[in-house]
């Protein structure tokens, strides 16, 4: 029987939730890396027991952790825990994210007050394992850049063409920092990927990361001087069904958008949503026109609308939305759901999962019709990913 | 020249990361300075690279401080000799995480 493994990153550690394919009884493991912020964990599609984790701290910086046994044990790649130091320079470079200033000089970007600010590495927001090689993985970082490891996370190299795109001095941080938070790989074209940055917008490469093109046409953001600018949009998240790589769905700061041409042009599909501000968005595993968002009241009130935790589902690729409420609190609820905190499994029926700032992780084993909490009292959830295990 | 054993007290999260107790002991070449102590610490525990000093700039991370002998040594030159009591192992070098946040 199939199983699912839900990888939950929180403000104070990582948790791994497992169940059989019925998704009714759950085992909870953790906290792993207790007390550390776990921005993201994701398993390799090639080897599901290979999981990468971004462990980070405002005090102690960035750590990359890796598990080769499905999350039972962890180590920093290249630095087995407790191993005595060998002669020569220290081995571990797994937490070294050095911008490639030789290839693309470090510039400045806009600061909150409009002045220019130097590029500084702060943390890894998102890890995206390769679709074809378990040792290859991309990292989206703050200040915004994309890095790649081809040795299982031991060493990281920047793909400097993105940071050095030339528009960098006009990029600016969102409230959470100037983060590259979304990386989507094209399963049909290994040279193509999409990324998104708050607040620069979405970019696409068609040559394996050497060069990047802003893909923000159709986005309209009233909070920047030119609402239709080429860059500067606060894209919160992008989702794609792997069976249809040209079709993308975006939750922007405000507005839910879709593109049917790989991001060349976007149209708004917010439709009848009660508010179109939000962070999370995802696509049904088997129905590529079925999408999910969690509307958040506003950018100054980061909690759900009307005190009701509602996932909204569109079966028409946007515009027509229905509220999914069964099993979710419908009064006195004021949680947020962050951009990487929603995921889908690939079972039939499709399972949907999301985590909240209140520490709940909810699951639906019937594509959103009904919900149940897997856990209710974790630290604030930063990210949720799901692995469907055969 | 190899000195006496230097004692270093680590904050809890770094103890967990390095899988050590409250205090670690290291031999450090004389003269004993912040830089030499941290070089030796990172050589022995490579998982700590980047956690006390920035990986690229080698500057002390802003929310960490170095205390010893009831003094704050955080703003001293990394190449300044540490107090004799630290160099002799009588007193530990304390690496402290700032008390901030939750």
Image: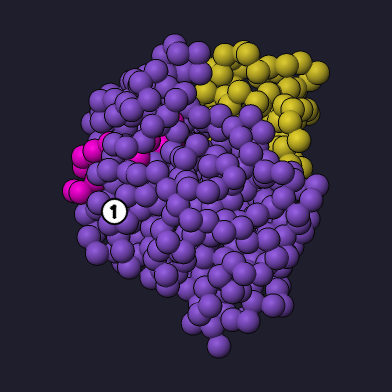
Q: Residue at image x 69%, y 77%?
A: A24
Q: Say left or right for A237 vs A167.
A: right
Q: What percent of the width, then of the height, locates residue A156?
A: 37, 45
Residue A210 sits inside the magenta stretch: yes
Q: Residue at image x 20%, y 49%?
A: A206
Residue B72 sits inside the magenta stretch: no
Front residue of A128/A236: it is: A236
**Residue A96 lies in quadrant:** top left
Q: Residue at image x 31%, y 64%?
A: A244
Q: How is the image coloured?
A: by chain
Residue A270's place in the image compared with A299, above or below, is: below
Q: What percent of the width, then of the height, locates residue A294?
A: 59, 51
Q: What percent of the width, then of the height, locates residue A374?
A: 71, 66
Q: What percent of the width, then of the height, locates residue B50?
A: 52, 36
Front residue of A363/A116: it is: A363
Marker count (numbered):
1
Chain A colour is purple
- Please indicate, yes or no, whether residue A252 appears anywhere in the rendered image: yes
Chain B colour is yellow
Element on which disc 1 rests:
loop
Chain designation of label 1: A
Pick out the residue farthest to the left.
Answer: A207
- Please indicate, yes or no, whether residue A33 appears anywhere in the rendered image: no
Residue linked to disc 1: A260
Front residue of A132/A88: it is: A132
For label 1, the crowd category at 10 Å Cα-Cα, with few meaning under 14, some 14 to 19 and many 20 or more, is some
Q: Say left or right for A54 vs A300.
A: left
Front residue of A253/A32: it is: A253
Q: Residue at image x 49%, y 59%?
A: A314
The residue stretch that appears in magenta: A197-214
Residue A6's place in the image compared with B16, above or below, is: below
Q: Say left or right for B44 vs A380.
A: left
């Amino acid at each position: 029987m199939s199983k699912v493994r839900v990888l939950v990153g929180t403000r104070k550690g990582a948790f791994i939730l497992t169940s059989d394919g019925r998704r009714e009884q759950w085992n909870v493991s953790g906290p792993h890396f207790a007390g550390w912020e776990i921005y993201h964990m994701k398993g390799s599609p090639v080897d599901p027991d290979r999981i990468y984790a971004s462990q980070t701290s405002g005090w102690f910086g960035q750590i990359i952790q890796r598990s080769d046994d499905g999350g039972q044990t962890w180590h920093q790649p290249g630095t087995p825990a407790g191993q005595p130091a060998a002669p020569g320079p220290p081995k571990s470079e797994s937490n070294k994210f050095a911008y490639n200033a030789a290839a693309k000089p470090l510039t400045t970007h806009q600061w909150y007050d409009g002045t220019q600010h130097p590029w500084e590495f702060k943390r890894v927001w998102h890890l995206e394992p390769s679709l074809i090689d378990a040792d290859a993985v991309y990292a989206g970082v703050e200040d915004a850049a994309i890095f790649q490891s081809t040795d299982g996370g031991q060493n990281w190299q920047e793909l400097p063409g993105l940071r050095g795109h030339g528009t960098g001095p006009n990029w600016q941080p969102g409230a959470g920092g100037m983060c590259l938070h979304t990386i989507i790989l094209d399963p049909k074209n290994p040279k193509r990927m999409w990324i998104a940055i708050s607040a620069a917008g979405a970019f696409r490469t068609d040559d394996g990361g050497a060069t990047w093109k802003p893909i923000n046409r159709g986005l309209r953001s009233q909070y920047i001087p030119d609402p239709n600018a080429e860059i500067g949009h606060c894209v919160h998240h992008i989702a794609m069904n792997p069976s249809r790589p040209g079709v993308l769905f975006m939750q922007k700061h405000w507005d839910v958008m879709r593109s049917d041409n790989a991001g060349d042009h976007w149209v708004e599909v917010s439709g009848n949503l009660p508010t179109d501000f939000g962070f999370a968005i995802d696509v049904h595993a088997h129905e590529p026109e079925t999408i999910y968002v969690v509307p958040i009241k506003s950018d100054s009130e980061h909690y759900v609308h009307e005190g009701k935790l509602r996932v909204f589902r569109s079966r028409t690729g946007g515009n027509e939305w229905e509220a999914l409420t069964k099993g979710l609190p419908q009064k006195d609820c004021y949680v947020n759901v962050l951009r990487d905190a929603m995921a889908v499994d690939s079972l039939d029926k499709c399972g949907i999962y999301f985590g909240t700032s209140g520490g709940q992780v909810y699951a639906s084993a019937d594509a959103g019709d009904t919900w149940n909490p897997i856990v209710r009292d974790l630290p604030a959830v930063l990210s949720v990913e799901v692995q469907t295990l055969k | 020249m190899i000195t006496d054993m230097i004692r270093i007290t680590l904050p809890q999260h770094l103890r967990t990361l390095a899988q050590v107790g409250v205090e670690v002991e290291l031999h450090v070449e004389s003269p004993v300075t912040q830089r030499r102590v941290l070089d030796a610490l990172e050589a022995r525990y490579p998982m700590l690279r980047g956690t006390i000093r920035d990986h690229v700039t080698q500057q002390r991370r802003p929310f960490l401080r170095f205390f010893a002998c009831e003094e704050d040594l955080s703003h001293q030159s990394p190449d300044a000799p540490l107090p004799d009591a630290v160099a002799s192992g009588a007193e530990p070098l304390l690496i402290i995480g700032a008390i901030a946040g939750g």
